[in-house]
Image (cartoon, rainbow, N blue to C red):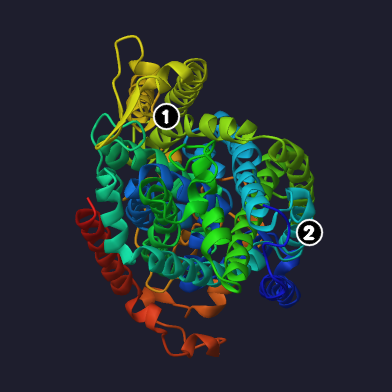
Amino acid sequence: MGPGVLSAGDYVIVAISLVVVFGIGLYSTLQKRKGTESVGFFLAGRSMPWWIVAASLFASNIGTEHFVGQAGAAAAGGIAVGLYEWTAGYLLLVLGWVFAPVYLKCQLTSIPEYLEGRYNKHCRFLFVVITMLAYILSKIGASLYAGAILVKVVTGLNLWASAPIIIVATALYTVSGGLTAVMLTDTVQMVIFVFGGLVGTLVSLKLVGGVSGLFSIFRKTDLDYMTHLIHPLNDRDFPWLGMLVGQPFSSLWYWCIDQEMAQRVLSAKNLDHAQIGAATAGFFKILPVFITVIPGMVARALFELCESDGSFPEWCADKTRPLSDDNAANEAYPLLVVRQFPVGVKGIMVASFLAAMMSSLSSVFNSASTVFTYDVYQRFWYPNGDAPPHKLVLVGRGTTVALTLVTFLWLPMIDNSSRGLYLVAQNAMTHLAPALVSIFLLALFWRRANGEGAFSGFVLGSLLGIMRWIFTLVTETECDALVKSGPQGQIQKLTASTWLACMNFNHFSMILLAFTTVVVIIVSLKTEPPSQSQLEGRMFGNLGSRKKGYTQPASNSPRTSDAEQTNPTPYNPFADTAKVEGNRHHEDQEKESPSFGVAGVESTEPQDVDLTDLRPFTWIEKYGKTVANCLAVALFLSMTVLITIFH
């Protein structure tokens, strides 16, 4: 592929989409006068409505790695990779109904804060280290690796010719506008790549006669397994037990614990907005199967038709890189765009790819800067939590600039590698997820879990995961030799000497989760129980009553909670900060509340009345909880029906 694959019209479409995105980022930066406040910068003033929360959750998740890696996995293994998307709908319900109530109750700014409050500072620090490594090595690498493939295949250019402008521009609106700019541009980017993805799907399916024609091609070419979500237990890539049980537990880290996703619900106006946003994002997760998985399968179907009857000859011209090969399959969707899409549609698709890349990078930049600012800078330089807000914002912006430089350092490594360091780092990070999930679930549901037990399980579980990861690298060739392709898929026959290293990771994740849990339980029972202050407000079901329509206070203190809205004595999850803002908040409460004399008789003294409190209730204030619960039920049923239909 050489330059000139795109026409002048395609480049105009790409340019217009970029101008719109950067224009929205600039506009939000100029309008957001709270940009100098820490909560305004890192949590968008805790004022985001449900629809922006939903769009940002979805857009932050969908990146160029979906159009490359997920479409490639679909080309190699079929629709089963879609289980990652449809089970995510269930996990978004867990985020909204299990984790979000606790996070909002504690008024967190970063998720590691929760670990120190519930366990100890050692758990918090270890989680910060793993989070920062995951962002730098895995998430930034994922976007750049996928972007390198897309740019090279579709435009014929190397990554250096286009990525620097995109990276710098993305960093600029992230540095200037903080989370507000990120979430607003996420919303625009979501519209762009969903529209482009749907256009790509329609064009793709037209080539093969629709979904029925696509599935018919696979049945005729002895690839019927590619049309089913559920694969045999000994399938190498998508065994049903691992995909339905092990994978959702491991994915809890990403959807419910990782700062990038949790930060979206932390920015919501209140719990109703957070839950409706999470449920709506769950419905959006129906789409990736159709906008990335199906096109990847179409590319594989065209390759199989070329092999069987000679139609679409361009798809089997390169015998050295068949789409049945896992590595070559990563180019499935970009090649589909180049070979089959008309002028104009190519431009729409490139705009979609770039929008997905920018949304991923901006989310990582902002989330990583939040974690570093609050969990490293403030934690060690201002342990009492009294860092001036302008300094927090300055450090956050400096962290984003530093991450931008790190991103540039990644470019030569990504550009000169076929699989490279990114995939190695990505695999390593996934081996750390089960230990993290275990200590968070025990923190929420088991009162006896303490800091000693959590830290022991965290360390030992992580070490076991890394040891197994190293083992898989050493035995990779031996494991590949155990796989045989057949009508049922990529079937793997394990032996007594290879089962540990070669078993599917989603199966191993269940073992690792159980191991970590046992360690935490044993050590916790052998040591002192946690104090009541460590449990109060930090466990599921131990949150107190929620005032209907409660809106998060948009103060500079990240640790004020809704207990401060209702109790004479402010509830402070960390007991060392938020004193000034908490007192100021209670003074405001006293002004707004009627004063009572002896025996509860209301005073006749004139009181200041805030007329803004007399406004009509919005529909969310009236029916928010009902709407959220109805959406949750509908989402659960929708995902279950889809999985049943395509099983």
Which corner quadrant of the image does residue 205 belong to? bottom left
Name the residue at 37% across, 72% down.
548
Tell me which amino acid carries mark 2.
Ile
- The residue to which callout 1 is attached is 450
- Foreground: disc 1 or disc 2: 2
The answer to whether residue 31 is above or below residue 142 is below
Q: Pointer 2: residues within 10 angstroms few (<14), some, or many (20+)?
A: few
Work out whether 465 lies above or below 315.
above
The x and y percentages for residue 150 are 62, 53
Residue 165 numbered tag: 2
27 displayed left or right of 473? right
Residue lying at the far top in this picture: please name it: 497
Residue found farthest to the front: 310
Residue 470 is marked as: none
Tell me if I can see residue 108 in this picture. Answer: no
In the image, taking residue 159 as reference, residue 483 lies left or right, namely left
Look at the image and tell me whether residue 450 can be seen: yes
Instruction: Report the Cα–Cα distance between label 1 and label 2.
Output: 48 Å
Secondary structure under tag 2 reads helix
Q: Residues within 10 Å of mark 1 (few under 14, many from 20)?
A: many
Q: Element under label 1?
A: loop
